[in-house]
Image (cartoon, grey):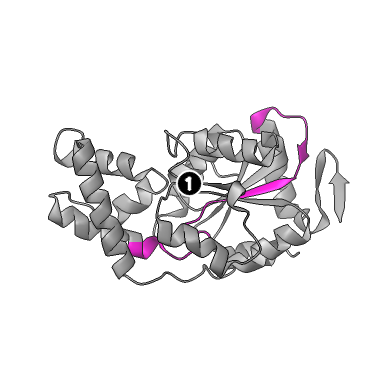
Amino acid sequence: MTHTYNNITAPESFLSEKFSEAVFAYLEQSGFERFELKAVLFDMDGVLFDSMPNHAKSWAEVGQLFRLGVTPEDVYLNEGRTGASTINSFARRDWGREATTEEIEEIYAEKCRLFNECGMAQNMPGAERVLNAVRNADLQILVVTGSGQASLLERLQTHYPGFFNPEHIVSSKDCRHGKPHPDPYLLGLEKAGVQPWEALVVENAPLGVQAARAAQICTIAVNTGPLSNETIRDAGANILFPSMTALADEWRG
């Protein structure tokens, strides 16, 4: 059931003191007069799937093959970029130049091969409970990811059956500019047919948080990786949880 609390319109299950304080802060920062929740936009890696350790491992291995000194922290800090943008960020640092188109294609293909060899990542604990709360509140559910990993995108339908409409998925193939640019989340808003003050983002990465805030969307962060809470807060998250399970505990639907 939807309720209005001052100028916040949202499911009753969302209107806890913790969420309300975050939304009031968001309204003050953004300058919007109201918040009317209609859609929730989820990042994928590190939010829906516990896939970031496999991404970190495969990026580190491909880095060794191509003289790129990639650390796990590098991967988490660059999470959300498109594959090409990620490769170029490492190439500029370690090669002193951008990678060619051919190099990008070769490196990314090898990275995907190594990632798939890691085995399939599990669903993130707590994620299905959050999705159920959102669905039970009759809110739209979208995915906005910087990933182009076909193995993960295809698993959205099999591991979370009934939650995701293919027309409501934004991947790296859909945007020229990846996170931290706002384009992925702006396209998500367009697909949902909503305004920034009518949506909520769930992210785990600093660049993803920056992208959501650049699109002027209220942003929940879940720290499911090795980065400090300060690193994620500094990116501009309106509220931070230590896990998807903690978010599910707060948002009971």
Residue at the far top: name it.
31
Residue 33 covered by magenta stretch = yes
Quadrant showing the C terminus: bottom right
Sort mark 1 into few (<14), some (14-19) or many (20+) by Cα contacts within 10 Å.
Answer: many
Q: Relative to residue 25, is residue 228 drawn left or right?
A: left
Q: Which residues are magenta?
A: 29-54
Q: Quadrant of residue 180?
A: top left
Q: Is residue 171 above or below residue 161?
A: above
Query: Residue 37 versus residue 31: which sits nearer the camera?
Result: 37
- Residue 46 visible? The answer is no
Three-letter amino acid code at disc 1? Ser
Query: Residue 30 versus residue 43: which sits nearer the camera?
Result: 43
Percent of width and height locating residue 242 = 53, 61
Q: Relative to residue 130, is residue 215 drawn left or right?
A: left
Q: Quadrant of residue 24?
A: top right
User: What residue is rendered at 52% in x and 67% in y?
Assistant: 124
User: What residue is rendered at 83% in x and 56% in y?
Assistant: 12
Q: Is residue 66 above or below residue 213?
A: below
Percent of width and height locating residue 122 = 47, 71
Q: Secondary structure at mark 1?
A: loop
What residue is shown with label 1? 171
Percent of width and height locating residue 239 = 61, 49
- Residue 122 visible? The answer is yes
Percent of width and height locating residue 204 = 49, 53
Q: Is residue 142 above or below residue 126?
A: above
